[in-house]
Image: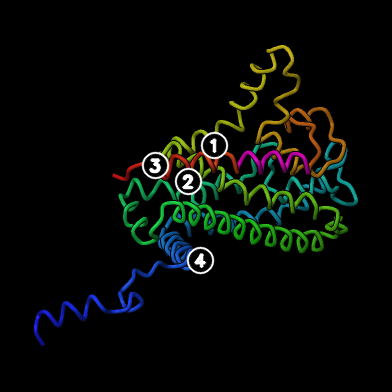
Amino acid sequence: MSPTAVTTSKRDASPYDRAVPVIPLAGTALKRALHYEYMRLRGLRSTWVVLAALITLSLLNGVLLPMEAMGAGPGGAGQSSLDTGRLVDSLQFNPIGMQLPLSAWMLVFVFGTGPITTEFSHRTARTAWLTVGSRSLSYAAKLITGTVGALTASVVGLVLSAASGSTAVTVVGLPQPDWWAACGPLLRYLTVMACLPVLAGGLAACIRSRLMTVLILALWPLMLERGFGLAVEQIPGTGNVSEWFPFAAARAAMSGTENPEEFTRLLIGSDLAPLTGLAVFSVSAALIAYCGWQVYRRREAP
């Protein structure tokens, strides 16, 4: 065939016969991104260390539940059953006294800050973006994977604590506490635990430093939030604005006591209704995650 014939054949070919680039569907790309993040988390030693520690502490937490009942009466004299407030606080790993559940301190380190900060520190960000094909999908996959991982670990820890606690209470001869009454606060606790990786991931994306993110998440609920609230409330017209701060609202959401005493109210730091506090914390986590996305999609990888 002559070159002229070849040229004419190409020119006369139907446009539907020409090769076009195949663009993968968003669902397929997101599935690939989620699988990538899952495999990466599963391959980290820190993930399994934290999960093993959480399981151990959850079992121990349940075994020690009868001691909470025996020491709950006046002067530590004991009582017939563990009240709902103390039961909830114990199963939630004491968020009121520690200002954040002990399980949160552990899980946020792996499932909250890890997915974003490690890819920059280990210089794997470009690999992740090329694998997924979109920074936005990569960021969404990190938040989804962290949320599912933290929520799953929290549910497993809660079930283990409740199961071992129920067994321990039966063994020592105490009546079972009102488990049904604790369901509401415990469900709100799980919602807070699901929102924490979203908040931590957004903050990590803004700072891009795992150490600084962990320090901020450790110091903010303990000291900085209250200090900042006291400073802001000195401004006329601000009122009790500190009640609406994220972690104060989270503690109000997780509280299992309807009318806490004054000291407990001071530890909580907010008089918001539980559902209102949960909404405030969820919106705060979403806003920080949005800010993190704006920074993440514009930053260059090392």
Q: Which mark is residue 255?
A: none
Name the residue nearer the viewer: 24 or 184: 24
User: Three-letter amino acid code at disc 3?
Assistant: Arg
Q: Are marks 1 and 2 in contact (CB under 8 Å)?
A: yes
Residue at image position (59%, 46%) is 196
The residue most toward the left is 2
Reading the image, the residue beneath label 4 is 27
User: Three-letter amino acid code at disc 4?
Assistant: Gly
Q: Quadrant of the C terminus?
A: top left
Q: Nearer the N terminus, badge 4 or badge 2?
A: 4
Percent x, y for residue 84? 84, 48
User: Three-letter amino acid code at disc 2?
Assistant: Thr
Q: Nearer the N terminus, badge 1 or badge 4?
A: 4
- Label 1 Cα neighbours within 10 Å, binned few <14 / some 14-19 / many ≥20: many
**Numbered disc 4: secondary structure:** helix
Q: Nearer the N terminus, badge 3 or badge 1?
A: 1
- Look at the picture and state if 165 lies above or below 235: below
Q: Nearer the N terminus, badge 2 or badge 3?
A: 2
Which image quadrant is residue 37 in? Answer: bottom left
Reading the image, the residue beneath label 2 is 113
Residue at image position (74%, 59%) is 162
Magenta-drawn stretch, dominant element (helix, strand or loop):
helix
Please state which of the two labelled residues, at mark 2 or mark 3, is closer to the viewer.
3
Residue at image position (68%, 13%) is 235
Reading the image, the residue beneath label 3 is 298
Magenta residue span: 275-285
Percent x, y for residue 185? 78, 49
